[in-house]
């Protein structure tokens, strides 16, 4: 009989979101009258419709595809030049950062990029992730066979977990042991924390002196309000020699259902070969993309390009203003309810401490039963998330105002 990839059998059965769904379903079966006023603050998905400029650009692109003269078949696997140029200029040059157009690879999502990048990295690399963590980083490494088995506390053998807590501002300290690949996500999901220039500089210095790679996930950079917080890892000198950056239009442009993202692979980035020499990662990623991917649709890339037009930028700004306005209202309400809250000022997530002695799932149940509000228990993101819960600011204003009202009626 043929065999399967047994690494998949090491995966924790989808624990967090299925368990939330199960508890909500059970609650609604017992209290059907709560169905109409249940508010979900657990989702990491956007709620507001696509910017008008994006819809218009996509409509025109569809019309182009329907005419012989302007029809397009396969596009460049790395992405169309018109989009790569706009990204290089607006996301990097305007911030004083050098990223060449051909170092930008357009894809259908950061989730896929994060998983696929593992194809071009050696099997024996030691991985480090933040705890709490976006589960995709861990699970894709489990699937790729870079970990041992799951332990009783839900962590995996062979992964270094970097604890993020209120003492370190949810930015981990440098590890004692040498790690090869470090996942950093700022602004952070789930904690809503940001990393200062100094903190990122420490990590870049660590990576350079240990010849490690930083995978920098900047999916939420557009939500940064504080002008001193870097939007890109490449704002840190030396980062081009040690970091890849993942960016996505999902949260910034409401593209979670459209699908468009990009990865930056600087040409200076070198890795060790099996023979002990050094080779650049850029041609490997180019090879991976051209061989195993056929590009993002022209229509989608035209939609993404529209986010950089004057009209598109203004519309992105109003999306961000909406979600960050939600975050501010939620913060106020949570503080007024006597809870300690982190995040929510440069990211669309609030990381709230459960009342003293309460476990994440206990808070989840209490919020569900007493307030008919669904939150995400922090322990679902890792053991350092125990005693916290996440509130997402991705919601309508009406829902956020209602949540604030309910929290005040404790
Ligand atoms: C939402 C999110 C992304 C974006 O993923 P896409 O596949 O581009 O939609 C990336 N990283 C984190 C941490 C996220 O929360």
Image: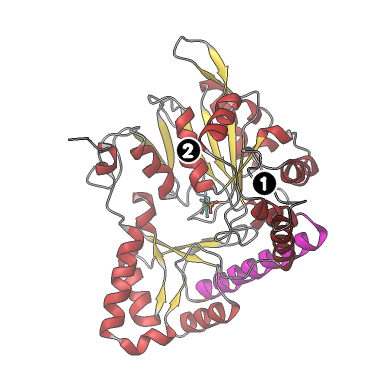
Q: Secondary structure at mark 1?
A: loop
Q: Separation of disc 1 and disc 2 at Cα?
A: 23 Å
Residue 55, above or below 127: below
Residue 265, above or below 79: above
Q: Nearer the viewer, residue 242 or 258?
A: 258
The picture places residue 2, in percent across and down from the top left corner, at 21, 35
Name the residue located 72 percent from the left edge and 61 percent from the top edge. 63
Q: Quarter of the image holding residue 262?
A: top right
The picture places residue 99, in percent across and down from the top left corner, at 72, 34
Q: The magenta stretch spans which residues?
A: 308-335
Residue 331, above or below 123: below
Q: Which residue is mark 2?
A: 116
Q: Which residue is mark 1?
A: 231
Q: Nearer the viewer, residue 28 or 257?
A: 257
- Asked whether residue 108 is drawn in magenta, I would say no
Q: Secondary structure at mark 2?
A: helix
Answer few, some or many: residues within 10 Å of disc 2's Cα (few below 14, many 20 plus, some between 14 and 19). some
């Amino acid at each position: 009989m043929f065999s399967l990839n047994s690494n998949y059998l090491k995966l924790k059965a989808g624990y967090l979101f299925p368990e939330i769904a199960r508890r909500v379903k059970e609650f609604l079966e017992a209290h059907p009258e709560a169905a109409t006023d249940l508010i979900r603050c657990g989702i990491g998905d956007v709620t507001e419709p696509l910017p008008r400029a994006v819809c218009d650009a996509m409509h025109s692109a569809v019309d182009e595809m329907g005419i012989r003269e302007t029809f397009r078949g396969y596009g460049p696997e790395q992405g169309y030049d018109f989009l790569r140029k706009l990204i290089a200029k607006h996301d990097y040059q305007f911030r004083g950062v050098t990223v060449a157009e051909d170092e930008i690879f357009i894809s259908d999502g950061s989730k896929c990029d994060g998983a696929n990048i593992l194809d071009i990295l050696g099997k024996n690399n030691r991985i480090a992730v933040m705890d709490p963590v976006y589960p995709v980083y861990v699970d894709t490494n489990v699937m790729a066979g870079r970990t041992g088995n799951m332990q009783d506390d839900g962590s995996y053998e062979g992964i270094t977990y970097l604890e993020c807590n209120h003492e370190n501002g949810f930015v981990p300290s440098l590890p004692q042991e040498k790690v090869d690949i470090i996942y950093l996500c700022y602004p952070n999901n789930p904690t809503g924390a940001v990393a200062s220039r100094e903190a990122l500089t420490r990590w870049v210095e660590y990576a350079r002196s240990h010849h490690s790679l930083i995978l920098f996930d900047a999916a939420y950079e557009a939500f940064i309000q504080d002008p001193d917080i870097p939007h890109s890892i490449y704002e840190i000198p030396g980062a081009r020699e040690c970091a890849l950056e993942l960016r996505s239009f999902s949260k910034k442009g409401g593209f979670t259902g459209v699908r468009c993202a990009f990865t930056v692979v600087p040409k200076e980035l070198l890795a060790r070969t099996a023979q002990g020499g050094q080779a650049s990662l850029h041609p490997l990623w180019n090879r991976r993309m051209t061989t195993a991917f056929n590009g993002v649709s022209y229509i989608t890339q035209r939609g993404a390009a529209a986010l950089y037009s004057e009209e598109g930028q203004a519309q992105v700004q109003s999306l961000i203003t909406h979600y960050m306005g939600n975050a501010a209202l939620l913060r106020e309400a949570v503080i007024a309810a006597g809870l300690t809250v982190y995040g929510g000022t440069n990211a669309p997530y609030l990381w709230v401490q459960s009342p003293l002695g309460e476990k994440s799932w206990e808070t989840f149940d209490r919020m569900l039963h007493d307030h008919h509000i669904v939150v995400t228990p922090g322990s679902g993101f890792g053991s350092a998330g125990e005693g916290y819960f996440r509130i997402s600011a991705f919601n309508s204003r009406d829902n956020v105002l209602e949540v604030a009202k309910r929290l005040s009626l404790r």
